[in-house]
Image (tube, rainbow, N blue to C red):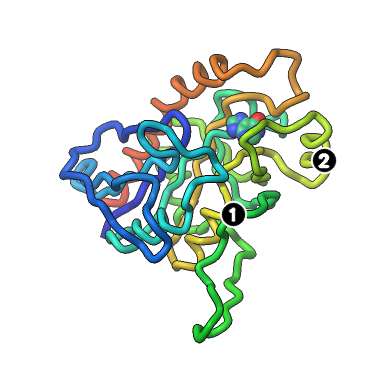
């Protein structure tokens, strides 16, 4: 069984991946964002999928989240670690900070958000009280600590529809709702993983102060610069996590 990594903006490849080849996997929901790269890091089997496609073609609302999760499970994923570029709302979540959220609020709409299609299958209301797998989160946090990588434990991720950024008033509302972070791709990915019984956790890379919270202009170039710096820390964190997994 493998660990699946879902790459977000700025994470197009897995550092240290010994690639064994690309797997193309059809699903009842159509095609995933692209072929899944299979291989290993430090002898731990790994699957990698860039959710926006390579080259990037899929904005957050056009990603086939159902096909992505289904394909990863079909290909043998035992757990999913998602990487998400986000904006920071809480003052402790400034640009450059890595955060492992422990809660989320879903503001998205119109996305295919469930594999429950009704019909003959029994009605299921999956428990989503804790949207991220606690054991997987703990393992990631321990790996970060062991590797000396600063990573904040916990936070509420507000998931917005995009692809535009939020207004200042929307961010004030999110803050009032208790959100610490804002991103566009955290849902329905997390809920689908739960429906498919895949333990799931997210590493959020804060790439900007959320709109209206900073007097700096929000530019893709500035976000890209922070992303490039954080990508190295994420790669080191993943490697430490996978190496620890090999030990158990
Ligand atoms: N808002 C929503 N999504 C994001 C942001 C943001 O400020 N930054 C990166 N992804």
In-image side of 76 versus 154 (left or right): left
Which label belongs to residue 111?
1
Above or below, 180 against 194 in this view is above
Which label belongs to residue 178?
none
Q: Secondary structure at mark 1?
A: loop
Residue plotted at (57% across, 78% down): 124
Residue plotted at (51% across, 64% down): 194
Q: Position of residue 103 (x, y in %)?
A: 64, 52
Toward which corner of the image does residue 159 lie, by quadrant?
A: top right
Please name the residue that numbered disc 2 is placed on: 173
Look at discs 1 and 2 and give the one toward the viewer.
1
Considering depth in this image, is 60 or 151 the residue closer to the camera? 60
Q: Earlier in the sequence, mark 1 or mark 2?
A: 1
Ligand 1 visible in quadrant? top right
In-image side of 62 versus 219 (left or right): left
Residue 87 in view of the camera: no
- 3D distance between C-alphas at marks 1 and 2: 22 Å
Dot 1 surroundings within 10 Å: few (below 14), some, or many (20 or more)? some
In the rendered view of the protein, which quadrant contains the C terminus?
Answer: bottom left
Toward which corner of the image does residue 158 lie, by quadrant?
A: top right
Residue plotted at (37% across, 31% down): 55
Circles 1, 2 touching at the beta carbon (< 8 Å): no
């Amino acid at each position: 069984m493998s660990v699946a990594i879902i790459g977000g903006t700025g994470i197009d490849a897995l550092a240290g991946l010994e690639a064994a080849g690309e797997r193309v996997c059809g699903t009842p929901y159509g095609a995933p964002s692209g072929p899944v790269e299979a291989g290993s890091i430090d002898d731990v089997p790994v699957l990698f999928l860039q959710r926006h496609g390579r080259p990037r073609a899929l904005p957050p609302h056009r990603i086939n989240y159902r096909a992505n999760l289904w394909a990863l499970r079909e290909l043998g994923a035992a757990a999913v670690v998602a990487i998400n570029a986000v904006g920071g709302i809480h003052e402790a979540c400034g640009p450059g900070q890595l955060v492992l959220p422990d809660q989320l609020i879903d503001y998205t709409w119109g996305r295919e958000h469930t594999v429950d299609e009704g019909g003959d299958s029994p009605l299921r209301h999956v428990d989503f009280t804790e949207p991220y797998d606690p054991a997987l989160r703990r393992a990631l946090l321990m790996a970060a600590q062991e590797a000396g990588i600063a990573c904040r434990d916990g936070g509420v991720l507000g998931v917005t529809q995009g692809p535009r950024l939020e207004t200042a008033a929307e961010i004030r509302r999110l803050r009032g709702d208790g959100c610490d972070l804002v991103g566009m791709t955290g849902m329905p990915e997390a809920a689908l993983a739960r429906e498919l019984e895949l333990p799931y956790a997210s590493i959020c890379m804060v790439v900007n102060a959320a709109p209206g919270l900073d007097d700096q202009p929000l530019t893709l170039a500035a976000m890209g610069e922070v992303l490039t710096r954080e990508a190295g820390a994420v790669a080191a964190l993943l490697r430490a996590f996978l190496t620890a997994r090999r030990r158990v």
